[in-house]
């Protein structure tokens, strides 16, 4: 399954986390876009499909993502 | 014995050998810098490389090639083994202190900061002190405090494991549930191995088992079966990781761990 997460639509995933919590196959992961540096906190996290091959195509993420950021192809 | 016991333990359990925790070893081969980079960039580095390997799953030849490569690298750099609570306590008894820190796996898989991990030999003020989002949640624990906390994690059903930073140096003790990246990669999806099972497997004594089935839900590896006919639980030794956490929920004390090497058909 080709899974896309639109990083513009999905703003601030760390305060939402619905995809991380609710995908039954635990497909998603999240990381700070920039490498951490000594002088700043890690901001700007993005959600990405980490284990897309585990996706069963249940399509639940299309419903529970409040920003419609996830698309399946 | 797992192959690390032969290579790094002189035939003893490698994670009970004091040298593998020594400051001398930590100071060699750029380990301190390796740990720093590993911990602060874990989510992006490990998350994206697992996603890349996963994307090759539909192309078996390429996938096998890159999986082997990734596993060889993991063995050399960061490999784990499940260890039951008694031996985790033995390990902590060999150390002066440990540093409680946020779990990088749960950060990647859940987006949460959960302090279930322990660093060994890490000076929180030097190597990680530069990263304010990381360092404010580091806490030095004295031996007894650490042992109490680890025992409470065991009661909650968290699986303990030790992890190398440039093998054989052991720099971390983890307490995991299904949000552990090694669990997701090795157990849930089976795409990449990064740890050995414990030196043990669980066995149920049917004279003592009362058929309550608590152990079924405590096992994260789906290794416990229930026989409706016999009204008893049984452990599938091929699935069992030997973590021993099922023992904590068994009131009659029916479950014990036996040495894995006593089973000719089992591997690590
Ligand atoms: S379709 Fe279902 S299994 Fe696939 S990513 Fe969405 S929620 Fe997860
Ligand atoms: S059956 Fe094995 S893997 Fe499952 S909890 Fe017990 S010791 Fe751990
Ligand atoms: S927890 Fe103990 S008594 Fe209950 S089913 Fe499992 S082995 Fe039997």
Image: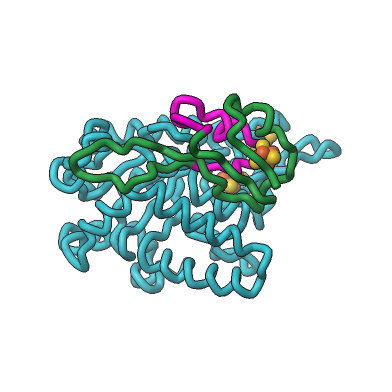
Chain colours: A green, B cyan
- Based on the displayed image, in which of its 4 quarters is residue A69 positioned? top right
- The residue furthest left is B126
Q: Is residue B223 above or below residue A11?
A: below
- The residue furthest front is A8
* Residue B208 appears anywhere in the view: no
Quarter containing ligand 1?
top right
Residue in the foreground of this view, choosing between A73 and A35: A73
The verdict on residue B129 being magenta is no
Q: Residue at x 13, y 46 (%)?
A: B126
Relative image position of residue B29 (x, y in whole percent): 21, 68
Segment colored magenta: A9-29
Residue in the foreground of this view, choosing between B171 and B45: B45
Q: Residue at x 18, y 48 (%)?
A: B127
Relative image position of residue B131 (x, y in whole percent): 22, 40
Relative image position of residue A63 (x, y in whole percent): 68, 28
* Residue B51 appears anywhere in the view: yes
């Amino acid at each position: 399954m080709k899974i896309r997460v639109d990083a513009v639509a999905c703003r601030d995933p760390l305060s939402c986390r619905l995809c991380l919590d609710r995908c039954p196959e635990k497909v998603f992961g999240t990381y700070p876009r920039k490498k951490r540096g000594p002088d700043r906190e890690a901001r700007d996290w993005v959600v990405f499909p980490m284990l897309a091959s585990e996706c069963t195509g249940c399509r639940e993420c299309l419903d529970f993502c409040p920003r419609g950021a996830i698309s399946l192809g | 014995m797992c192959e690390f016991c032969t290579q790094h333990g002189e035939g003893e359990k490698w994670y009970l050998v004091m040298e593998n925790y020594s400051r001398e070893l930590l100071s060699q081969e750029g380990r301190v810098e390796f740990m720093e980079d590993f911990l602060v960039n874990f989510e992006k580095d490990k998350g994206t490389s697992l996603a890349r390997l996963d994307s090759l799953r539909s192309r078996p030849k390429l996938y096998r090639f890159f999986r082997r490569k990734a596993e060889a690298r993991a063995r050399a750099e960061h490999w784990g083994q499940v260890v039951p609570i008694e031996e985790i306590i033995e390990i902590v008894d060999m150390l002066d202190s440990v540093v409680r820190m946020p779990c990088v796996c749960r950060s990647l898989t859940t987006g949460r900061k959960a302090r279930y991990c322990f660093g060994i030999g890490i000076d929180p003020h030097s190597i990680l002190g530069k990263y304010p989002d990381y360092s404010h949640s580091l806490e030095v624990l004295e031996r007894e405090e650490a042992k109490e906390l680890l025992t409470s994690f065991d009661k909650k059903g968290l699986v303990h494991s030790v992890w190398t930073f440039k093998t054989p140096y052991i720099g971390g003790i983890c307490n995991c549930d299904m949000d552990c990246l090694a669990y997701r990669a090795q157990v849930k999806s089976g795409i990449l191995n990064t740890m050995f099972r414990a030196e043990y497997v669980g066995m149920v004594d049917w004279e003592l088992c009362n058929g309550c089935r608590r152990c079924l839900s405590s096992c994260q590896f789906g290794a416990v079966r229930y026989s409706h006919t016999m009204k008893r639980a049984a452990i599938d030794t091929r699935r069992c990781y030997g973590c021993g956490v099922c023992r904590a929920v068994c009131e009659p004390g029916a479950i014990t761990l036996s040495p894995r090497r006593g089973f000719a058909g089992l591997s690590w």
